[in-house]
Amino acid sequence: METPPIRKTTAKLMISLARELTSNGVLLLPEYEQIQAAVSSLARATPKSPPIELKFLTGPQVAEKLGISFSQFKSLVAEGALPIKKRFVGTKTVRFLLAEVLEFMEHSSLMHP
């Protein structure tokens, strides 16, 4: 069975703890060096997280996802009935975060009667 990788911050914390135990005489230097090598090896094997990609939708795209007309969507936005923030990507251009739309769809009583 392969040992899963660990985060670099976890590895640093473990090595720091082992260093402190070595300086207090709890661990011997060869043990510390072995722990340091093993923990460092596990941390190097950790794959990097993919970058988070923000996906923006236009008003008509959001309306389509919600299953309503664009005019209904505009009315709901104007009334403040949707907890989905407008994001200005220009002086007049408005977009909506896909993640917020999906969260609204998942938790809204409007979407789940």
Image (tube, grey):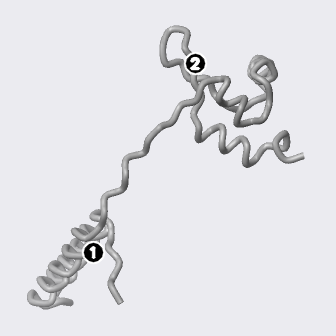
- In the image: residue 64, left or right of residue 28: right
Q: Which of the pair 71/97 is nearer the observer? A: 71
**Badge 2 or badge 1: first in the primary sequence:** 1
Instruction: Provide residue 103's location: percent of width, then percent of height.
Output: 67, 44
Residue 84 placement: quadrant = top right
- Residue furthest right as drawn: 113
Specify whether 4 is left or right of 92. Answer: left
Eyeballing the image, is 48 above or below 113?
A: below
Residue 85 vertical position relative to residue 50 in the rendered view, above or below: above
Amino acid marked by disc 2: Val
- Using the numbered discs, state the Cα–Cα distance from disc 2 to disc 1 in whole angstroms: 47 Å
- Looking at the image, the residue that sits furthest to the top is 91
Residue 3, percent from left and from top: 33, 83
Left or right position of 86 against 38? right
Residue denoted by label 1: 14
**Depth check, front residue: 17 or 53:** 53
Q: Residue at x 32, y 73 (%)?
A: 5
Task: Name the residue that disc number 2 marks.
Answer: 94
User: Which is nearer the eye, 92 or 41?
Assistant: 92
| Mark 1 element type | helix
